[in-house]
Amino acid sequence: MVSERPEDTLRVTLTGTDRPGITAALFAALAAHDALVLDVEQIVVRDHLTLSLLLAGGEHPKRLAAVARQIGEDLGVRVRVRSGAGDSQQSPTGRAHVVVLGHPLAARAMAAVAERIAAHGANIDRIRRLSRYPVTTVELDVSGADVARLRTELAALAAAWGVDVAVAPAGLARMGARLVVMDVDSTFIQQEVIELLAARCGNEQEVAAVTERAMRGELDFAESLRARVSLLAGLDVAVLDEVRHEIVLTPGARTLVRTLKRLGDTIALVSGGFQEIVEPIAHDLGIDHVLANRLEVRDGRLTGRVSGPIVDRAGKADALRRFAAEAGLPLSRTVAVGDGANDLDMLAAAGLGIAFNAKPVVRAAADTSVNVPYLDAVLYLLGIPREDVEQADALDGIPVLTPEVPWPSALA
């Protein structure tokens, strides 16, 4: 029988240039001495290997240490052995995932995050990279954290250091199906649809000024929408088809939807814009739910009025709750993404509220932010690595495109 007493344990760490066969050779040598593996972790960064094991050494821990050192010498790697290390003492509570996203990710930003986690009284147990382009994203496994308080502390730090940080509970709380609800104008698509419509009747600047004030929260959304739609009175309904063909999706939008659908997630678009534009986009991408305003039409022309209830900030939040209930999901399994004041209630109601290139008032209220122009960066905040996305695309015959991302000449 192999002893598992702390004093009989060995922590063996190998470091050196990686090549096939190192791990197999080490375990084969240890197997001859009936070593018991209590913990193991291996990582390769570029071609540099770090392999760490915690072993129970039975009655011959010194013999195991000698075996480990000999195999290191034979393989040309460095070996460190610590006797009586005992098993890891990670906190059984307060487990969290901290995702840090930067473009680029500066060392000083990582230093600030790590220092804040330490000051919080938590420990970083593991770090892995989720993406290297078009943004750099790393995920830190943290123990001993008050998740809500750490989220607040790191949100303030993220704004100061120009990175995006998301904090989520670890374990089953992060797994399983989700509902992801997204705003449309300036989030899922790059334009503001009402401004495209207003350009057809010469009122674009006036409408854009009202839209900007509404998104900053300076105007009541319903009143501002009525005022803007009134300026569209008389437009031929055929204009809606013209505008629909001008819509440009935000980079990464298709990848985000495709990946979430592979995972079995439910996706919704909720918009203060117009159903006539949003619904065909959603249908094309296989999106499950759509809620938006409807334009009133008479005799083939817009009347300048909205038909039915206006989808405002309260309406968006209500839609999130309704879609979650229909999917049989608790609100903790919901994610909301938006950029304007009209999204605030939805972001607050969701289990994770993400401000996407948002107005300051929205960034301040959201759980986390994405401040790069790639909507699929939301996947990284959910812990989904880019490698997995690309592998799934390749299996489905979808070309993997590597965008040209200029490296900044200086780190601001």
Image (cartoon, helix red, strand yellow):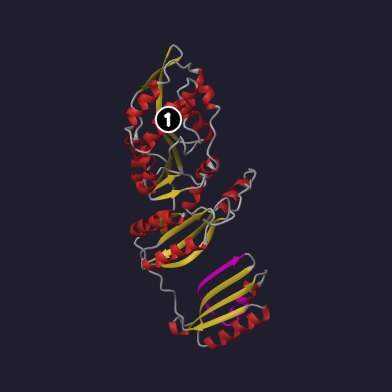
The residue depicted at 48 percent of the width and 17 percent of the height is 237
Q: Which residues are magenta?
A: 26-45
| Nearer the observer, 168 or 222 | 222
| Nearer the observer, 324 or 338 | 338
**Relative to 396, is 310 above or below?**
above
Instruction: Report x, y in % for residue 9.
Output: 48, 82
Instruction: Report x, y in % for residue 234.
Output: 44, 15
Residue 401 visible in the displayed image: yes
Instruction: Report x, y in % for residue 185.
Output: 46, 34
**Relative to 149, is 65 above or below?**
below
Residue 330 visible in the displayed image: no
Q: Is residue 270 magenta?
A: no
Secondary-structure class at tag 1: strand
Q: Residues within 10 Å of mark 1 (few under 14, many from 20)?
A: many
Residue marked by disc 1: 273
Instruction: Report x, y in % for residue 125.
Output: 46, 68
Residue 25 relative to residue 368: left or right? right
